[in-house]
Image (cartoon, helix red, strand yellow):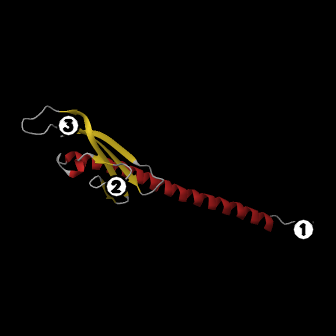
């Protein structure tokens, strides 16, 4: 009977290479998971911004015409008194301007004109997209 001195199996070098490849793959997957979580948070902030912009437009629409928030003016790039609000981590700004049409003159009262309102929601995160809603309000 012959006996063989060769033993079947992996050498220490082969095991180290396989372990290094596996560790590199796990680190890459962990980095992808972290990046995916960040992208999901930015998407959530962007969606929240759209909802806040629409809600603020609707709130402005329901205010009486003489309310300070519905006065002409405002800025989409800077906070202006009565034309911005901070909701959580999102800054909401709006601009009110005269619209394209006015109604018939009312005897003894002011002429009612349409108002153009532009609302912009800016999330704190610079990677999340800002949302803009624009519309006309009559009355």
Which residue is more in the foreground, 103 or 62?
Answer: 103
Of callouts 2 and 3, which one flags the residue occurring earlier in the amino acid sequence?
A: 2
Residue placed under numbered mark 1 in the picture: 5
107 left or right, relative to 87: left
Residue 113 badge: 3
Q: Nearer the viewer, mark 3 or mark 1?
A: 3
Tell me if mark 1 has few (under 14), some (14-19) or many (20+) residues whose alpha carbon lies within 10 angstroms of its own. Answer: few
Q: In the image, residue 103 lies at what x, y percent?
A: 16, 33
Residue depicted at 33% across the width and 51% down the height: 93
Q: Secondary structure at mark 1?
A: loop
Q: Quadrant of the N terminus?
A: bottom right
Tell me if mark 3 has few (under 14), some (14-19) or many (20+) residues whose alpha carbon lies within 10 angstroms of its own. Answer: some
Residue 32 badge: none
66 left or right, relative to 134: left
How far apart are the alpha carbons under marks 1 and 2? 83 Å
Q: Quadrant of the C terminus?
A: top left
Picture layout, residue 103 above or below residue 27: above
Residue 79 badge: 2
Which residue is more in the foreground, 114 or 88?
Answer: 114
Which residue is more in the foreground, 22 or 83?
Answer: 83
Q: In the image, residue 14 lies at what x, y percent?
A: 78, 63
């Amino acid at each position: 009977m012959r006996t063989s001195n060769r033993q079947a199996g992996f050498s220490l070098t082969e095991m180290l290479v396989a372990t290094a490849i596996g560790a590199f793959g796990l680190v890459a997957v962990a980095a992808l998971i972290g990046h995916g979580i960040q992208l999901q948070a930015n998407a959530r902030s962007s969606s929240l911004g759209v909802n806040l912009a629409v809600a603020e437009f609707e709130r402005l629409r329901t205010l009486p015409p003489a309310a300070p928030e519905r006065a002409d003016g405002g800025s989409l790039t800077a906070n202006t008194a009565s034309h911005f609000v901070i909701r959580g981590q999102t800054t909401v700004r709006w601009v009110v301007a005269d619209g394209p049409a006015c109604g018939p003159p009312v005897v003894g009262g002011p002429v009612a004109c349409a108002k153009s309102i532009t609302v912009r929601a800016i999330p704190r995160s610079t990677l999340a997209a800002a949302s803009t809603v624009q519309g006309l309000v009559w009355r």
